[in-house]
Amino acid sequence: MRYFLSVCGLAISAILFSACHQPSDNKSNLNLQPAGEAWGALYQQRAAEYKALAFQAYNIAQLRLDQQLKIKSKKPLSIITDIDETVLDNSPYFVALAKRGEIYSDSSWVKWTAKVKCDTVPGAAHFLKYAAGKGLTIFYITNRFEQERLPTLKNLNKWGLPQAESAHLFLMNSDDSKESRRLLVQKKYNIVLLLGDSLGDFDKFFDHLSDNERTAHTQQMAALFGAKFIVLPNAMYGTWEDVLYKDKNANSIQLKNQVLLNDLK
């Protein structure tokens, strides 16, 4: 009898607890900003799956490079690579922001890069050194600011990354599109591979588009991914998030959070 009463009591308690804690359709209790960036950073820092994806990207890059080396070219061969979340890992910066309840700002970003504390993305150093050893010219095209030139070069050289010198580092100019900088390389070189974590690292057709337009262009250019375009994973930040705020006056953490919540399915 005591066992029966105990079981009944547990069952009733479970029902009452369940009734009081049913999942709510109200998304207002979720905080994707700034906590989401820390979740993405946790994945980048701790998940073996993240490392596997990075190794996979660079293994494919090496395979494609070896194929290109068998083809005659009138121009010398080159590779264009992004830096942040493609070659260098900035996850500690986003962890620090989340702990302070803040989101990205140019001033805090510049302070972070000045510390020269970025680690490398798994597989990046090995691949770039391999490519340089095969005679390719490497260009680092990034939307870091001009004032970050010296610490950026220091951080690249800290890990012995090849051709990490000012002539091979193209920082952001008046336009955040990387197209004009890619065209400068293209004048003298045959660009066989482009590496990046954002679609704007690959082609001008991805610049300044809406979320749906970016998806449509990705589908149209599907054959280039894994062939000439090598994409690295980045769940912390990027244009994929920025376009969600477009024309929505999301100029605070609260407003950004609401925009993201409205987009959840």
Image (cartoon, rainbow, N blue to C red):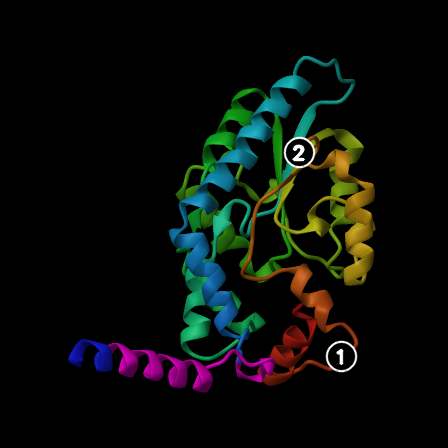
Q: Which mark is residue 248?
A: 1
Residue 45 coordinates in the image, percent (x, y): 40, 53
Residue 137 coordinates in the image, percent (x, y): 62, 29
The CA distance from mark 2 to mark 1 is 34 Å
Instruction: Look at label 2 and name its amino acid.
Output: Gly
Q: Which mark is residue 226?
A: 2
Of labels 2 and 1, earlier in sequence is 2
**In terms of depth relative to the viewer, which is nearer, 4 or 187?**
4
**In terms of depth relative to the viewer, which is nearer, 158 or 126?**
126
Q: Which mark is residue 65?
A: none
Q: Where is residue 231, by image quadrant?
A: top right
Instruction: Look at label 1 and name its amino acid.
Output: Lys
Apparent side of residue 69 relative to residue 10 in the rendered image (left or right): right
Q: Residue at horizontal 71%, vertical 73%?
A: 245
Q: Where is residue 132, by image quadrant?
A: top right
Q: Residue at horizontal 54%, vertical 75%?
A: 33
Residue 72 within the segment the image draws in magenta: no
- In the rendered image, the vertical position of residue 223 relative to residue 72, given as above or below: below
Apparent side of residue 165 relative to residue 215 in the rendered image (left or right): left
